[in-house]
Image: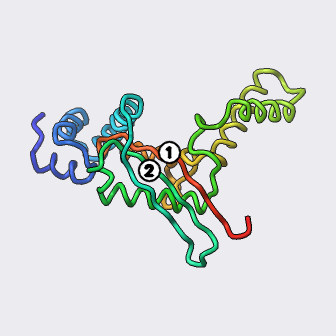
C-alpha cells in the first residue's frame, strides 16, 4: 500500500515521531491514523525502555514549585543526556509538571527501585500478617496487590499524573523519552510544608 506523504506528515505532527517510523506505522495499519498512533506508542514504550537502560543522563535542570500561599514548596531534579534537551521548553515544562506533582501528591521515593530493600521486606511482612489464614496462592496475589498500591502512594513514577489521571508519571516519562529521543529521569526531589 502506498502511503500519501501528507498523511505521513499529519501523523508526524500528531505523534511527534520520525518520518520513517510514521510511514512504517501507517503501512502496518493500512493507513489507519488512530491504529498507527497506537502502534507508535507501543514502539515508543519499547524505545523508551531501551534508552533508559543504555544511556546516562548527566545533564538536566532543577526546578521549583512554590504554592501561591508560600506555605508549600517542592524542588525537583530532572535529568537528561544533553544540555540541548535541558534547554528545551517541553523538557522544562515536564520538570515543572513533576515539581507540581511532588508538591500535590507528596511521594516519598522517585521509583520502587529506590526504596530500601529492608523497607519493602517490612511492608511485605506487614501485608502477609493482614492476610494470615488465607490459601497461599491467594495470599501472594493479595500481598502483590497491596505492594503495588503502596508503590502508587509512595513512588512518584507510579502515581497518576495530576494533569491527566489516565496516565501514570512513568507513562508520561516514556512518552517524552520517545518524543524527545533521550533518556529522561527524575533523580531526586524534596517537598517542604510550613510547620512539617
Q: Is residue 3 left or right of residue 76?
A: left
Residue at coordinates 86% horizontally, 35% vertically from top-left? 130
* Residue situated furthest bottom in the rendering: 69
Q: Which mark is residue 94?
A: none
Report the residue marked by disc 2: 78
Q: Are marks 2 and 1 in contact (CB under 8 Å)?
A: yes
Q: Is residue 177 left or right of residue 152?
A: left
Of the image marks 2 and 1, the number of the one nearer the N terminus: 2
Report the residue marked by disc 1: 187
SS at mark 2 in the image: strand
Pointer 2 local density, CA inside 10 Å: few below 14, some 14–19, many at least 20 = many
104, above or below 55, in the image? below
Residue 109: x and y, percent?
61, 45
64, above or below 16, in the image? below
Pointer 1 local density, CA inside 10 Å: few below 14, some 14–19, many at least 20 = some
64, above or below 167, in the image? below
In this figure, what is the number of numbered marks?
Answer: 2
Measured in 3D between alpha carbons, the distance from the residue under mark 2 to the one under mark 1, in whole angstroms, is 6 Å
Residue 94: x and y, percent?
41, 56
Instruction: Compare residues 38 and 68 and report the one nearer the observer.
Output: 68
Residue 6: x and y, percent?
11, 50
Image colouring:
rainbow
Residue 66 figure quarter: bottom right
Residue at coordinates 57% horizontally, 41% vertically from top-left? 111
SS at mark 1 in the image: strand
Q: Is residue 195 left or right of residue 38?
A: right
Q: If the image is split into quadrants, where does the N terminus sit?
A: top left
Q: If the image is split into quadrants, where does the C terminus sit?
A: bottom right
Residue at coordinates 16% horizontally, 42% vertically from top-left? 19
* Residue situated furthest top in the rendering: 136
Instruction: Compare residues 100 and 45 and report the one nearer the observer.
Output: 100
Amino acid at each position: 500500500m502506498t502511503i500519501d506523504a501528507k498523511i505521513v506528515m499529519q501523523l508526524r505532527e500528531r505523534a511527534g515521531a520520525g518520518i520513517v517510523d510514521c510511514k512504517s506505522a501507517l503501512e502496518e495499519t493500512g493507513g489507519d491514523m488512530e491504529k498507527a498512533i497506537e502502534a507508535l506508542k507501543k514502539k515508543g514504550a519499547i524505545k523508551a525502555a531501551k534508552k533508559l537502560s543504555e544511556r546516562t543522563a548527566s545533564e538536566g535542570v532543577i526546578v521549583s514549585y512554590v504554592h501561591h500561599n508560600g506555605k508549600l514548596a517542592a524542588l525537583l531534579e530532572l535529568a537528561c543526556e544533553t544540555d540541548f534537551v535541558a534547554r528545551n521548553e517541553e523538557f522544562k515544562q515536564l520538570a515543572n509538571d513533576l515539581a507540581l506533582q511532588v508538591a500535590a501528591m507528596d511521594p516519598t521515593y522517585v521509583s520502587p527501585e529506590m526504596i530500601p530493600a529492608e523497607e519493602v521486606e517490612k511492608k511485605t511482612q506487614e501485608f502477609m500478617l493482614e492476610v494470615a489464614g488465607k490459601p497461599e496462592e491467594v495470599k501472594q496475589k493479595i500481598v502483590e496487590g497491596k505492594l503495588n498500591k503502596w508503590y502508587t502512594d509512595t513512588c512518584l513514577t507510579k502515581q497518576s499524573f495530576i494533569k491527566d489521571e489516565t496516565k501514570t508519571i512513568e507513562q508520561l516519562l516514556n512518552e517524552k523519552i520517545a518524543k524527545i529521543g533521550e533518556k529522561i529521569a527524575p533523580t531526586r526531589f524534596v517537598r517542604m510544608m510550613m510547620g512539617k
